[in-house]
Image (cartoon, rainbow, N blue to C red):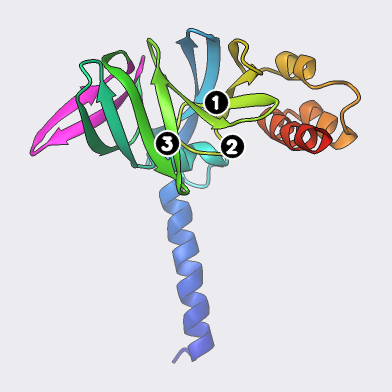
């Protein structure tokens, strides 16, 4: 017979094992999308139940599968609530359900969408293929294709009120001064671009 502590340990290990197995059913795939701000690369996930133990990156698996509670405002000013993932095909879309009828809602059909994340409303503005959500405001604004706050999902950047552009190593190097703290410059060298921008925003705010 298993003792009490052994049962607890077994339960914990089982939950961790099953979580890993479920997560591993999604394989990360890099996808390039065209936006009015240029071509940017995002990570999406394909369902592959035969693949186990594959490494999944930080944010994309969680937020790719997450169902957001969203307010949708259409171009005719009508609005409604949906709970949907943000799906990615050749363009982005969300799914609205009315009884058993499902309707795909595309960015070009909307004026805006919004969702609450960690108690904060995140607003997304449409373009031809995506919604753009500002996820962090600072010396360098960060934008995402998901309604979440913070830098983890950022794929676009904007200096002050200038042009919104995809995050690339060259743009980040040009945006962050060479006399910035070494810890921030090292993040750029290691390819942690969104984190470097986030850290620089915190540094710039202290220097004001």
- Disc 2 designates what residue? 152
For the point 26% across and 15% down, the residue is 109
- From which residue to which does the magenta span run? 91-107
Residue 71 lies, in percent from the top left, at: 30, 34
**Circle 2: element type:** loop
Query: Which badge, 2 or 3, is on the more N-terminal residue?
Result: 3
Alpha-carbon span between mark 2 and mark 1: 10 Å
**Circle 1: element type:** strand
Tell me if I can see residue 94 in this picture. Answer: yes
* Magenta stretch: includes residue 50: no
Query: Which badge, 1 or 3, is on the more N-terminal residue?
Result: 3
Residue 105 lies, in percent from the top left, at: 25, 23
Which of the two discs, 2 and 1, sits closer to the camera?
Answer: 1
- Disc 1 designates what residue? 143
Residue 94 lies, in percent from the top left, at: 29, 28
Mark 1 neighbour density, 10 Å: few (under 14) some (14–19) many (20 or more): many
């Amino acid at each position: 017979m298993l003792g009490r502590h052994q049962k607890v340990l077994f339960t914990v290990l089982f939950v961790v094992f099953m979580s890993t197995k479920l997560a591993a059913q999604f394989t990360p795939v890099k996808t390039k999308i065209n936006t009015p701000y240029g071509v940017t690369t995002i990570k999406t996930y394909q369902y592959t139940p035969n693949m186990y133990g594959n490494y999944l990156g930080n944010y994309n698996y969680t937020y790719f599968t997450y169902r957001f509670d969203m307010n949708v405002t259409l171009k005719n000013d009508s609005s409604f609530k949906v709970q949907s993932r943000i799906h990615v095909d050749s363009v982005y879309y969300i799914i609205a359900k009315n009884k058993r009828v499902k309707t795909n809602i595309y960015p070009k059909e909307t004026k805006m969408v919004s969702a609450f994340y960690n108690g904060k409303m995140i607003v997304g503005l449409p373009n031809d293929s995506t919604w753009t959500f500002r996820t962090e405001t600072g010396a360098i604004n960060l934008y995402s294709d998901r309604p979440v706050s913070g830098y983890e999902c950022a794929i676009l950047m904007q200096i002050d009120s200038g042009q919104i552009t995809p995050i690339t190593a060259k743009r980040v190097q040009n945006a962050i001064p060479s006399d910035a703290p070494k810890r921030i410059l090292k993040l750029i060298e290691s390819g942690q671009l969104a984190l470097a921008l986030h850290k620089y925003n915190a540094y710039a705010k202290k220097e004001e």
